[in-house]
Every structure is written in C-alpha cells, then in structure tokens.
Amino acid sequence: MTAMQWFFSYLRNYRKQLIFAMVLVTFTCVCAIVNPQISGIIVDDVIKGGNREALPRLIVILIISTLIRSIVKYCFLLIFEKSSQGLLYTMRDYVYRRIMRQDFNFYNNNRTGDLMSRQTGDMNAIRHFVAYTMHAIYENALLFIFALVMIFVVDYRLALCMIAVMPISVYITIKQLKAVKPAFHNIRERFSSLNTFVQENVSGNRVVKAFAKEDYEISKFKKENDAYRDSELQAAQIWKKYVPVFDFLASSLTVILYLVGGIMVIKGSMTMGKLVMVSGYIWMLNMPLRQAGWLANDYQRFVTSIEKIYATISVEPEIKNPEDGIVKKSFKGDVEFSNVSYKISGEEILKDINFRVKAGQTVGIIGATGSGKTTLMNLLCRFYDVTSGQVKLDGIDVRNIDLYNLRENIGMAMQDVFLFSDTIEGNIAFGRPDCSIDKVIEVAKVANAHDFILDMPQGYDTIVGERGVGLSGGQKQRISLARALLKEPSIIILDDTTSAVDMETEASIQEELRMVDGKHTVFVIAHRISSIMDADLILVIEDGRIIESGNHQDLLEEKGYYHRVFYHQYGDFDQISKNGGNSIG
Amino acid sequence: MARNKYDVDESLETEFNLSHLKRLAGYIKPYGKEMFIIILIMTVSSALGMLTPVILKDILDVYIPNEDIRGIVLIGVGLLVINFIIALTTRIKISATTKLGQDIIHTIRSDIFNHLQKLPFSYYDDKPHGKIQVRVVNYVNALSDLLSNGIVNTITDLFSLFFIVAFMLYLNVRLSIICLLGLPLLMILIFIIKKKQRVAWQLQSNKSSNLNACIAESINGVRVTQSFTREEESIEIFNNLSMEYSESWLKAVKLNFFLWPAINNISIWTTAAVYVVGIAWLDKGLAGITVGVLAGMSGYIGRFWAPINTLAGFYNSLLTAISYLERIFETIDEPVLVKDKEDAYDMGAIEGQVEFKDVSFSYEEGVPILNKVNFKANPGDTIAIVGPTGAGKTTIINLISRFYNLDSGQITIDGIDITDVKIASLRSQMGVMLQDSFIFSGTIMDNIRYGNMTASDEDVIRAAKTVRAHEFIINLENGYDTEVNERGSRLSVGQRQLISFARALLADPKILILDEATSSIDTETEILLQEGLKKLLVNRTSFIIAHRLSTIKNSTKILYIDEGEIKEMGSHDELIDKKGLYHDLYLSQYQFLEKDKIS
C-alpha cells in the first residue's frame, strides 16, 4: 500500500458525506454563475432598458438565491470540516495505536519530538487538505469547465483560444509540484527537528541549568529556529517562481479574449453581443487559474505530510503478538532460560544464558553496569526477542503466549522510573485503573510509600509532575514499586528498584515484600548485596554471560565476583561488630 | 498555580486586552520600512489591476465601434505589459511577505524560548512538558499566516477599499451612503459573535495543548504503558482528548464560517437597496443620478465587498491567533524568580569554601523543607549528605547552585554571598550530577562535552576513563560517536550515570555535586571510579548524596539530615562512636548478616 492508498482508505469512509458536499459545491457554483447574470439583467434591462416591472422579481431572486447559496455554502463547509475532523480522529487513533504497540527498538530509533510532529503538524496538513484544498480544487475545476462549455456554446473559436492556455498551465502545475516537493519535505524535517530540540530542552531543563548552559542552548536553538525559517523561505523562493505565472496567464486570458474577439467583431465574424457575453464568463476562467499555484502548494504540503505519517506507521514492530497466542488466566511463574542469546546491531548483549526458576522463588541478579541484566528481563517480557534459544514461562515459549496476556502476568518496576502527570493514586493504580483506594493504600504500605504520601499536601491526590519531578529518586522508586505490586502478577521484576532508597527503608520494604512473597516469582536486580542475598538463586552476570550462580552461601564460597562485592560492601563488618555490635538486631 | 495534568485545561490568568495586539504590533514595528515598501508596491499593483477593466471597457466602447485594429493590438500589448508587471509584483510580494512573517515568528519564538531558559525548575515541574513545548513550536507557527500574508493583504485591501469608496463617492454620494449602511450592520454582527469566538478559540487552544501533552507523555512513558499492558486505556484517554480537540475545533470554525455568509447577504441587501432606491431616484429625476451612474455604481458595489471579505477573514484569524498569542505572552511574562541582582558581578575563580548560615527554605509557603541549616565545607572537603528519602538532601545541594532563592539565611562561597554574583558565573564552576541523568540525543562524545564545550576529544576520553565509562563506550558500535537517544534509552541507567558523571567532571569544577550519582552503578565499577576520583577530588569541594554507605564512608564530613535539619554532623568514625542516627543507619545494612551469621 502506498501512502496515498492508505489515505484513501480513510477518505472512503466519508464518501457519502463528501459526495453530498460536492453536490452542494456544484450547486453554489451554479448560483455563483447566476447571480452576476441577474445583476447584468438589472443593469441592462431594468436600468438601461427601462423595464421597471421586472425589478421586484429580480431583486427577490437575487436576495433569495444569495441566501440559499450562503446557507448551502455554510453547510458544505461544515460537512468538509466535520468529515476532516472525523477522518483525522480515526487516523490519529490508528497512528497512536501503531505507535503504542511499537517495540523498544522503534523508540530507540525515533525521537519523541519527531513522533509528536506526526500527530500534530502533519495531521494539520491533512486536515487542511480534506477540509479545504479538496473542495477548492473541485470548485475551481468546475468553474473552469463551466466557463469553457459556455464559451464553446457562444463561440467555439474563442473557446479554442482559451483552451490554448490549458497545456501551459498543466505543464507549469506539474513542474511546480515537482519543484516544491523537496522544499516542503525539508520544511517538515526542520519542523520535526525544531520540535525535538524544544522537547529535549524542556525535558532536560535541569541539566541545562545545572551546567549554566542556557546561552549554549539559546545559540543551538537559534540554529534550529534559523533552519526552520530558512526552509520556509527556501520553499517560498521556489514557489514564488510559479504562482505569479498563473496570475499572468489568468489576466492574459482576458487580454487575449478582447484582442481576438475585438478583431473578430471588427472583421464581422462575431457579434458584439457574443463578445460581451463571453467577457462575462471570463472571471470563471481567471479565478481557477490564479488559484492553481496555491492549490498545487497545498496539495504538495499534504502529500509530504501523509508520506511522513505513513512512513512512521508502516514500520512493522519486530515484536509481534502471535496469532492464536496462548491465553491463560494466570501463570504459575516457572521461568526457564535455555541457551538464550541476544544480539543487536552486531553486538552480543547476552550469550548462552541458562537458568531455571520455580514458581514462588526469588532470583537475585547482580553484575557490572551494562552487563545485560535489564536486557535479560526485557527478554522475559518480550520487549525484545531472543536471537537464539528460548525463554519459557510455565514451560511455554514466551513467543507463543499472547503478548498482552504475558505482560499482564508480569509486574515490572523499571530502573528508569517514569511517572505520569497524574495523581499519586492514579500512578499507583496505573495497571488497574478501576481498583479501590484501599488496595492502592495496601500496596503503597508494602512499598513503604504510604507515610511519605500522606505527608504530601494532598496525600494520594497530589499530582506529581511528568517523570515524577517534585519527588525524590527514592520516592519515585517506591511509587513505581507499588505500581508493579498492584497488578498482583505471577512474576515481579524489580530492576534496581531500591537503589535510591535509603538502607533502612530498603530493609523494611524487603520485610514487607517477604510477606507477600511465595505467591510470586520475583526477580531482583540490584547492586547492594542486601537486596539479593536472601534470593533462592543469585545470578552474577558479566559481559552478557552468567559467570556465577547459586545462593548467597554458595557464591560466597566460590570466592569470585560475588564474594568480592560482598567484601567491598561489608568488609568492615568485623570492625563494626566489635565497636558497636551490641546494637545489631 | 496548581500543578497541571495533561487532561486538565489550563486556566488563563491574564484577561484579554488590547495590549496583546499592541505587543504584537511591537514585533512588527522593526519591519515598518519593509512593510511600507511592500504595501506601496502592492497598492500600485492593485491600482494597475483596477485600470484593466476601464481599458477593456474602452475596447468595447471605442475601438471596436471605430474598427481600430491597430489600437486594439496596441492596447492588448500594453495590457500584457501591465499584467507582466503585476505578476512581478506578486513575486516580490511572496518573497517579502514570507520573509516578513517568518522573521517576526522567528523573533517571537526566540523570545519565548530564551525566556524559558530563565525560568526555574518549578515552572517545568508544574505542567506537563508537552504543554510548554506546544507554545514554542505549534502556537508560534499558528501565527505565521496572520503575520505574513494576513497583515500585508489586509493593509493592501484597506487601500483598495479606500480607492473604491472614493470612486463611489465621486460617482454619487447618496447611493454610496446606502451602500455603506451595510457596514454598521456587519459591525453589530461581529460584535455579537466576537465573545463566543474568543471563548471557542481559547478552548480550542487548550484542547490542542492537552492533546500535545498527552502525546508527549504517551511516547515518553510507553515502556511503562506496555509493561502494564495499559495500551487500551491510554488509547481511550488519547481518543477522549482527540475527540475534545475535534469538537472544540468544529465549534470554533462554525462561528468563523458564520461571518462569510453574513457578509454575502448584507452585500446583496445593500446592492438591492441601491438598485431599488437608485431606480426610484432616477425615475424621479433626482440630480446626479443617471443611467450611467447607476450602472457604474453596480460595478463598484461588488468590488467594495470583496476587500471587506478579506478583512473579515483577517479578523477571524486575528481572533484565532490571539488565543495562541495570549499563551505565548503569558509564558514570556512568567516572572523570573531566581535572577542576577542588578549589580551582580562575575564570581571569578573560586577556592571552594561553602558555608550555610541559618538557611531556611520552603517550596511552598508554610511547608518548610529546611530549617536553619548551618554547616561549613572547606576547599577540598568531601561532604556526604545522608538521611531518609524526602528529608531535604537534594534541596540542600540545589541551593548551592542557587536553583532556588532562600527564605532566610545565607549561603556563601569563599565568603561571598551567592546572590551577589552572576548566576552563570556561579553555576559554571560547579559540576552537578543530578539524580535523574538526562542524555541529549547526539553522540556520546557530545553528551560528555556538554560539561565543557571547549574540551578536546582527549579531554572527553580522559574524563570518561576517570569514571570508568571508557570501556563500555569503546565497546559500542561506533565508540564515542555512537548516537544515543534522548533519555539515553539505548544505554542502561548505570551507563547513563557514568556518562553524566563524566560530563560533570569535564566541567573541571571547583565544587562537585553528586546526587545519587552512582546508585545504579555496580560496586566494582564504583570502587574503581572512586579510586580515580580520589586524585581528582584533592582540590575540589564535593557534596555527595548516596545510599550505599561504602560510597561515603571516607568523606571529610557526613551530614545526617532529617526533617529539614542537620541531626548529626561529623566524620564516619565520630558518628559511629556517637551511636546515634548515623550509627543505626550504618548498622541497618548489616542486619541481614546478623540473621545469617555470616561475617
């Protein structure tokens, strides 16, 4: 499917409205031809000719036809606007759905600002086309054809003269369409880029201020701002060559008419009356010609935007929901990784991962920064798919499980906490929007968040800023933990969830978690030994491989990585217990 | 103002008044000369355009009856030349008006963006980022048509209107007055719908802002949405906003569309009135009314209403634009709370002595965050700040960079009150690593270099080596030239922290502030990192917030903060001996060990 075919698949849904509206357009076009005629009759017949009796009737026709014409025009304008809004609504919905269902790689490769531009600026170009450009093209074409037909009826020779400009204008239109396309494409690119820049500047405002880089940002912004302006000016430089040509052609048409017509009248091959009549239709040829350049611009702007949108949505997500995926009400939570490897752009992130967890067990994962811990969990949730090997849940390859069913059964508190600009309650209840406040409070207590939430000005109704600004790192993490717990999933993944939480709070969170444990399989990624030492299985990951695995005791005895880390964190325990050991416990 | 959500309309706190238009005029003023020239050219061109029908009339009335072919050809050629000139002026007009409009928009956009750079964190914290962004990008763009073609066409049309009225008055005063009577009628109508239009467009701009905010958040939070399989709910929320947007748009254009038929009908009524009255007067033999005058009048009435139509269009887009303009100006007028004093001076190179004297601070009145905090850090000291989450640790370090103004008390650096110096000169001497490490889209090299734009590649690599980021960076596809994404989604959180750490170091600051800089970094890397840091920290004062106590044990001074006060202060050993809060906190990390009897 091409971008245009895609667009027409939407437009088709409005064909009834649009056809009806086009009929109305046709009607107003006819009216537009009638009105000047009546004015002409009044001047010629009534005023000049002295036929006074006709006046009242003509005036009534004039007023009524204008009234009807304006009502009809109002109606069709609204129909076009309504259809365009309806079309846009469904299109936005589809684009949004596509984007929401994209995999993580898509988001790694597309900037937020660009994706936003597709849904705002580009959509607006489509609105303009459906609401205005489409019927403007039709209206102008109609007028032009009407005029030609009527001139034909009056005098075919004059009509042929008029048609002579047609090939020229078609040629110029095609040339213009070709010439402006790259320019408009460039405008959309620059717009997108400007949007992205501003979006990042706003999101990163803290860093900008911390480094006192306001001036740098301003100078960078100036470049974006300049580039956008220049792209608009460049486009104008191109189309300014074409639009006046249409103007010239349009006005020359009149001159040609009078020249040729005048000579024909003098030569006696045409009557004066016919010339006057044709000159009455000439505006119907002029106007469409004058509009042609502008409409060509509008059309090409639209094409650029629809192509941009289509290119964005036609990226197929690599992670797909399997057809006839297995759906289970709940999974027990047995997890198995067998010979799992994951590669991206040639880089091996995970290699030969093998381990097995029984339902209800806790797995601790520790390892160097960037060693692949989070990726391991992302494979389980199918945010990425394995390159080789298998990830199994309850013995079923996760790729055979219905994607949404799979994810519904996994509660994940991510390393990079994202909260929505919503109330704290809304954020915690994100996975279950309809759950009761009691349930929210219950999980907030488990996550040790209840107390600080109550301390906030509006408690659970406090609105937190986007990304949870206004909360400390530890507070955000605890809300994110509560959010994951509320789902009551069979698998809980805590990815570095307590790294910004102080030691005491962490201890009490773990205490609480232990109470709800047993029902869930839990994965804990952490750097603090205290977070994982109680796990049934601890995996040490290095460079994408499991280098050590076992429980706390096993790993200490192995005297490898885990032991080293333990030693670093607790090496001075002896000394402390000597000094103040009495207070332990 | 209360914090705003994406699905809540923002209240407008400034009432609309003429001053918005005056301000807009202020933006146009510098282009007065260009504007004057364009309008002059356009006026000449429209005057030429008006000549054409007169000349054509001559062909019909004079040349054809006289069978003057030579004359017709001559006039035809003359007209073609005139048309050619008109086409040229159109070309000039396109260039000039686009330039004019884009330049003005460029200026407005710079103003709003530059002002945003001065606004405090709280401004960004209080509203969804998509709503700030929409003002800089989409709202400003919405003005482009008005500012380029709109103004020039309107002024040109005003001129042609003036000519037409002059012609009409010249033909017949009384008939002209009948025709002009339509205007007050139109005014009344405009007055009636104006208020509704204003409200409708304000609503529309709000809805578009909401939609934008929702899109931005949906994209940024998509990972959470997917992992919670909340796509359907998100889609529903989005569709609601999208529907509200559509409805508000339709409501607003419905009112705008109203103007056109109104003008059309009024114009026909006045035309009819001119015919009826004119013919009556003609038959009565009133002085000055002849068949020719009436016929001429009928031609001009049509021409009279055409520019009024464009003027009405301009008026419509002005009303639309104002709903965006007031938002833009609202942002530009947002007060800058933290700013340089008038006599602020450049700080000069500092030693790094930091002192808090009775510092009290609150984000919201009546909710104190810090209460009379006192401490002193000497150059080269490492100050660790510990305490429960939400105790005010981050606030303390934010105050050193003067991200907020104090309620009372004083912060001095090398004995100088930080409010006396230029903010940029203060902040540029600090390397701050924030809790939330933000990565700009660009290469890793660019991201680290953000700390110091003049640093060479070697400097960047050295900084990366110090924080132990070098190894993972060179293992990436394109090493330092690897393109990373906004929020660094290709990188793990720990890697992002290392990069922003390197960024902070590269600034070669006298004061280094690390807010949970290493929370997501593994212990081994952290130890290596600290070894590397040790040398670097010799002459620098550093403030460290961390929860892993191994990170902070060796600090010169540890501040235990709770409830906005310093509860304990001293070195690790001193505080352990004191057996107070820090002692308990320190031991809490061993409580599991006790249970397992491991040591």
Image (cartoon, rainbow, N blue to C red):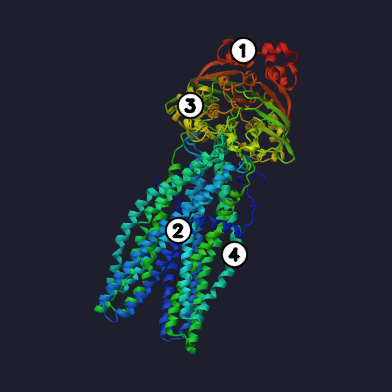
Task: Determine the CA span between mark 1 and mark 2.
Answer: 82 Å
Looking at the image, tell me whether mark 3 or mark 4 is earlier in sequence order: 4
Identify the residue position indicated by label 3 in the image. B459
State the image coordinates of residue A45 (x, y, percent, origin top left). Answer: 41, 83
Q: Which chain carries label 2?
A: B
Give the quarter of the figure containing the C terminus of chain B. Answer: top right
Marks 4 and 2 share the same chain? yes
Q: Mark 3 lies on which chain?
A: B
Looking at the image, tell me whether mark 4 or mark 2 is earlier in sequence order: 2
Marks 3 and 2 share the same chain? yes
Can you say whether A583 is above or below A470 in the image? above
- Image-based side of A20 in relation to B335, left or right: left
Identify the residue position indicated by label 2 in the image. B34
Task: Determine the CA span between mark 3 and mark 4.
Answer: 64 Å
Marks 3 and 1 share the same chain? no
Task: Determine the CA span between mark 3 and mark 2.
Answer: 49 Å
- Image-based side of B592 in relation to A197, left or right: right
Identify the residue position indicated by label 1 in the image. A553
Number of residue marks:
4
Task: Determine the CA span between mark 4 and mark 1.
Answer: 80 Å
Tell whether label 4 touches label 3 (CB within 8 Å): no
State the image coordinates of residue B503 (x, y, percent, origin top left). Answer: 53, 29
For mark 2, does the 10 Å Cα neighbourhood hold few (<14), some (14 to 19), or many (20 or more) residues? some
Q: Mark 4 lies on which chain?
A: B
Tell whether label 2 touches label 3 (CB within 8 Å): no
Identify the residue position indicated by label 4 in the image. B193
Q: Which residue lies furthest to the bottom in this view?
A: B284
Amino acid, disc 4: Ile
Can you say whether A327 is above or below B330 in the image? above
For mark 3, does the 10 Å Cα neighbourhood hold few (<14), some (14 to 19), or many (20 or more) residues? some
